[in-house]
Image: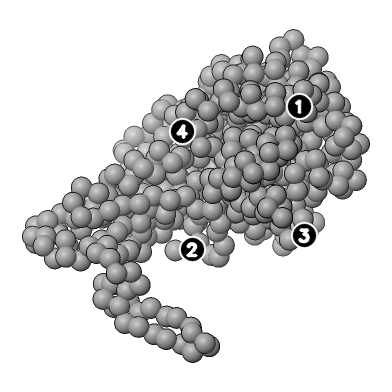
Amino acid sequence: MKFLISMHINPAVLEALTEEERTAIGEGHGRFMDGLKERGELITTQALVDPSQAVVVKVRDGQRVVTDGPFLESKEYLGGFYFVDVESKERAIELAAQIPDAAIEGLGIEVRQVMFADGVLEA
Amino acid sequence: MTGLAIEDLLREVMPQVLGALVRRYGQFEGCEDAVQEAGLAASVQWPVEGVPANPRAWLMTVASRRLIDEVRSESARRERESANAAEVPVEVADTDDTLLLLFLCCHPALTAASQTALTLRAVGGLTTAEIARAFLVPEATMAARISRAKQRIRAAGGSFPLPDVSQRLPVVLHVLYLIFNEGYTASSGSSLDRADLAGEAIRLARLVHAQRPADGEVTGLLALMLLTHARRVARTTAGGDLVPLDSQDRTRWDRVLIEEGLELAKGSLGAPELGPYQLQAAIAATHADAATAAETNWRQVYALYLILERIAPNPMVTLNRAVALAEVDGPRAGLELLAGLDADERMAGHHRLLSVRAHLLEKAGDSVAAYEWYRRAAKATASLAERRHLESRANRLRT
């Protein structure tokens, strides 16, 4: 079963972290990725640039409207994701709990199963 | 011989060679690598130099040499000799090595995903890339899974002599069932790859059946696969939409597969013991026997689900029994049986429970409630085709 484990970040929360905390998070992700790879559970993982670099595209009356900044007026943004292939939903939840972000107040992890897939998966 | 024919031949012979090697030397991991390399050499040499008179013996020799080289260099590294590794293997007669190999691949120390991957590779003779494509994961992911599975077997001391057949055979059948279902579920991916997986499961089930023709469950599983596979073309529209059993064009069912499946299903019921695959095959056979949906012998389907529920209690079986009961005694009777499943946490919010309830409410004439349950079921499913189907059922009730 394929799941998208997405990491919802809050830039203000991230900025408030100490250097040590940031290093620990980075190392935690490294170990997490190594484990996923070794067990054959990882399909791919990607991290996105800061939400301030996003643009929102709309077409109104056939005209393209491009606005700088993220789509949502909220504090949390999609920061990145792990795309995994695992035995069960329970396993996906177990993995999500191992992501360092899960232990930090203000950051969130969401687990959702894939319903349709297409395209090449050689990540 | 064409490249394609050579490929088929290799896929048939390589598992036998691997089985013979493992039987002789143990160490599944090393043998598997050696046979893979021998197979690679064959696929390069045979199209050019011709297929040897005894392909199996050729592969045995090349793989053994490779294995011995490997053991020798390992031994040298460890500065100790391995006496029996230098023995030249004798060609073993055609024994049930494939079955032994299946037992090893379905080692209980492995997860179901690893068991299926290893089975497809070692017994099915598929390449890692092919298995990865079939399961829609990157090759590196599948390679890691297979290599980890082999390490686990080694760590668990997995070599011959093999475990009790009666204990391991159900695991093997379950793995084949999973492979078949993976191919049959139209949840994602190109239909071609998935159909191949179902075909592969049938091929492997045939191998097991050839070795154990008197086993009722083996026969039952093969029958179930054939009868299900026979409906494959009728199961979806050209646009990829699902067609439920009662609306399928039965003239499109594969008669050859059905005849074979019916024969096997009948034969399996003569076995001294009755298991879940035999019963599921008997149910599939009852459906296959009906020329039209209206002619289905629902009393028999109901009775078979009742027995299945007794020998292998499972809420999904109860759910199916409710569908049969609704056909026999009316939708309200079916709905009453469903009510008992709401408390089962394995079924709570399961899309099948929601969609069956919607279906029975629709039959009972309660379109308002049926609409709601179809909508809920559509949201709960992880299959896009099923979601579309449930949404269209809901929309039909609104107009």
Nearer mark to the viewer, of 1 and 3: 1
In the rendered structure, the residue with mark 4 lies on which chain? B
Q: Position of residue B343 (x, y in %)?
A: 49, 25
- Amino acid on which the number 4 mark rests in the picture: Leu
Q: Chain of mark 3?
A: B
Q: Earlier in the sequence, mark 3 or mark 4?
A: 4
Q: Secondary structure at mark 1?
A: loop
Q: Badge 1, how many Cα within 10 Å: few under 14, some, many 20+?
A: some
* Residue tagged 4: B110
Q: Residue at x 49, y 89 (%)?
A: A63
Which residue is the site of mark 2?
A122
Few, some or many residues within 10 Å of mark 2 (<14, 14–19, 20+): some
Vertical placement of B140 versus A72: above or below?
A: above
The amino acid at mark 2 is Glu
Q: Label 2 is found on which chain of the structure?
A: A
- The amino acid type of the residue labelled 3 equals Ala
**Residues at marks 4 and 1, CA–CA distance in whole angstroms:** 45 Å
Question: Would you place residue B314 above or below residue A56 in this image?
Answer: above
Closer to the camera, B55 or B193?
B193
Measure the C-alpha gap from mark 2 to mark 1.
51 Å
Q: Do badges 3 and 4 share one subunit?
A: yes
Q: CA distance from mark 3 to mark 2?
A: 29 Å
For marks 1 and 3, the one nearer the N-term is 3
Q: Are marks 4 and 1 in contact (CB under 8 Å)?
A: no
Q: Of the numbered discs in the image, which one, if any, rests on residue B330?
A: 1
* In the image: residue B254, left or right of residue B167: right
The quadrant in which residue A56 appears is bottom left
